[in-house]
Image: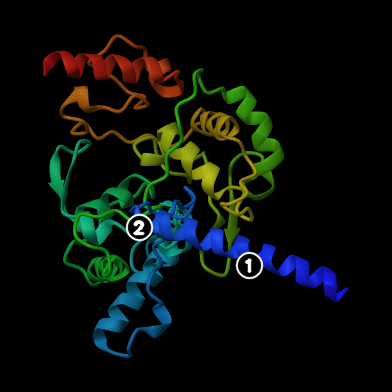
Amino acid sequence: MKIIRSSWLPFLLGIVFIIAILNKAMFSSGEKIKTSPDEKPQWHAPDINLLPETADGDTIRYGRELIVNTSKYFGPHGTIASITNGMNCQNCHVEAGTKAFGNSFSAVASTYPKYRERSGIVESIEFRINDCMQRSLNGKPIDSTSKEMKAMVAYLKWLGKDVKHGEKPYGSNAELPFLTRAADPQQGKTIYGIKCMRCHGSNGEGEIDFDSMGYRYPPLWGNNSYNNAAGLYRISRLAAFIKYNMPFDQTQASPQLSDEEAWDVAAFISSQQRPEKKFPEDWPKIESKPPDYPYGPYSDNFSEQQHKYGPFIPIRNAKEKKSAAIK
């Protein structure tokens, strides 16, 4: 055994020497170690439990409370006003806006005020909050100078306090590639019955959480859901949200739905009846409407049906071609 070990020792030392030489050559040539595509910088929300017991800390905590339990204060039986449909901001902005790919608030402080094509103006954080109050919560705006508005703004700014101006952290937006076909509401209905109905109900009615005066699982259509002017009514927005966050007990690393299934479920949900609210000032430049905006007029010749369900690639290509021709 000693003879065998002695004969192997020079060989092993030689391998170690060769590896050391190769590593030195790689680093001296300036080559960088490649990382996995998934190894991207993750944004982590500051810890609400570390806020000091100060007036500013209380304001931020109250802002978070309003995001989590919006209905308690502004729902049908709200303690401040009865001006919304009973949903909570957290129903769309997961974990009080702290979850990556869950409509997080990570980029709010770093990007607002900003110009948005939908309104055609430079929007403040206050304007954007009231936009959600009117669309996603199908309600009325609140006073921009109120204690509640100041608290929500303070919370959003506190969440993004470590994000550099103009930057959007990884996971602040969620997008899916367009399908090469139209999204199919009928296929989506089948998937909904298997994956979604257990929480959101057979009629999309959701599940009331009686302890918080809001919804544990929000209604996806019907009179108490978001209206047709909300961002999630666009199926590209809804499909991406579904893909990364639904069913609620999935992990983002192991999604339960394929991209196609997410698109089809989104098409089914968006095909159902919901409150209608008109904002005639939306999209003052019709050429800036996204491919999946379901209401005309348009600057192209594609139908409202195709703008709602797709296929969207021809619409996008036509838009890009037209834009290039103008330049």
Q: Nearer the viewer, mark 1 or mark 2?
A: 1
Q: Secondary structure at mark 1?
A: helix
The outermost residue toward the bottom is 53
Image spot of residue 275 (x, y percent): 42, 37
Residue at mark 1 = 13
User: Depth check: 24 or 292 in front?
Assistant: 24
Image spot of residue 195 (x, y percent): 68, 42
Q: Is residue 20 above or below residue 200?
A: below
User: Depth check: 229 or 5 in front?
Assistant: 5
The outermost residue toward the right is 1
User: Depth check: 112 or 278 in front?
Assistant: 112
Task: Report the residue at 49% width, 50% height from top.
Answer: 36
128 relative to 252 in the view: left or right: left
Q: Count the labels in the image.
A: 2
Task: Report the residue at 22% width, 59% height from top.
Answer: 110
Image spot of residue 60 (x, y percent): 31, 76
Residue at mark 2 = 28
Which one is earlier in the sequence, the residue at label 1 or at label 2?
1
Three-letter code, disc 2: Ser
Q: Is residue 219 visible?
A: no
Q: Quadrant of the C terminus?
A: top left
User: Depth check: 119 or 85 in front?
Assistant: 119
Q: Is residue 321 above or below residue 84?
A: above
Q: Which class describes the residues within 10 Å of circle 1: few (<14), some (14-19), or many (20+)?
A: few
